[in-house]
Amino acid sequence: AIILVHWLLTVWGCMNYMFPASYAWGNFSVLAVGIWAIVQRDSLDAIMMFLTGLLLTVLTDIIHISVFYPSNKYLIDVQRFSAGMAIFSLLLKPVSCYLAYRMYQERGGE
C-alpha cells in the first residue's frame, strides 16, 4: 500500500513540468527499491535501502518544492494540483518511514 500510494502521488506530482526530472527520478527509483523490498521479504538490505531512500527523498523533496514552487499567486489548476500532490507525498513520507522501520524490525533488524 505504501508503494502504491507514493507511486500515485508521484505521478500526480509530475503531471505538470513544474519540478525538474530529478524529482521524478529520485522518487521512482526509491519506489523501485521498495518493490525489491517487498519481493525479498527476508532481506534486511532491501528494506534498509528503502528506508534510507525514503529519508533522502524527504530532504530532496523539500529542496525541490522550495526552489521550484512558482512565486506568483496566479497558478493554473494543474500546477496547483501537482504541487499539492507533491506536498501531500512529502507529508506522508514520515509515516511511510515509520512503517518501513517497523518492517525492518520485524525482519530481525536492530
Image (cartoon, rainbow, N blue to C red):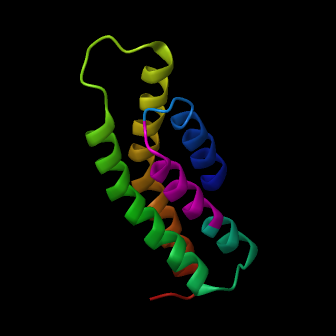
- Which one is in front, 97 or 108? 97
Quadrant position of residue 8: top right
Residue 106 at what x, y percent from top left?
58, 79
Reply above or below: 108 against 84.
Answer: below
- Which one is in front, 109 or 73? 73
Reply above or below: 95 against 8.
Answer: below
- Which one is in front, 68 or 32? 68
Magenta residues span 19-32
Q: Is residue 75 left or right of residue 101?
A: left
Q: Residue at x 61, y 45 (%)?
A: 5
Residue 9 at what x, y percent from top left?
56, 40
Q: Residue at x 41, y 58 (%)?
A: 57
User: Magenta-highlighted stretch: main secondary structure?
Assistant: helix
Quadrant position of residue 67: top left
Q: How many marks?
A: 0
Quadrant position of residue 52: bottom left
Q: Residue at x 51, y 63 (%)?
A: 99
Q: Residue at x 40, y 55 (%)?
A: 94
Instruction: Verify whether residue 31 appears in magenta.
Output: yes
**Position of the C terminus by quadrant:** bottom left
Residue 24 at what x, y percent from top left?
53, 49
Q: Is residue 3 left or right of residue 92?
A: right
Residue 17 at what x, y percent from top left?
49, 33
Instruction: Verify whether residue 22 appears in magenta.
Output: yes
Reply above or below: 82 against 50.
Answer: above
- Which one is in front, 5 or 106? 5
Reply above or below: 61 against 38.
Answer: above
Q: Is residue 67 left or right of residue 3?
A: left
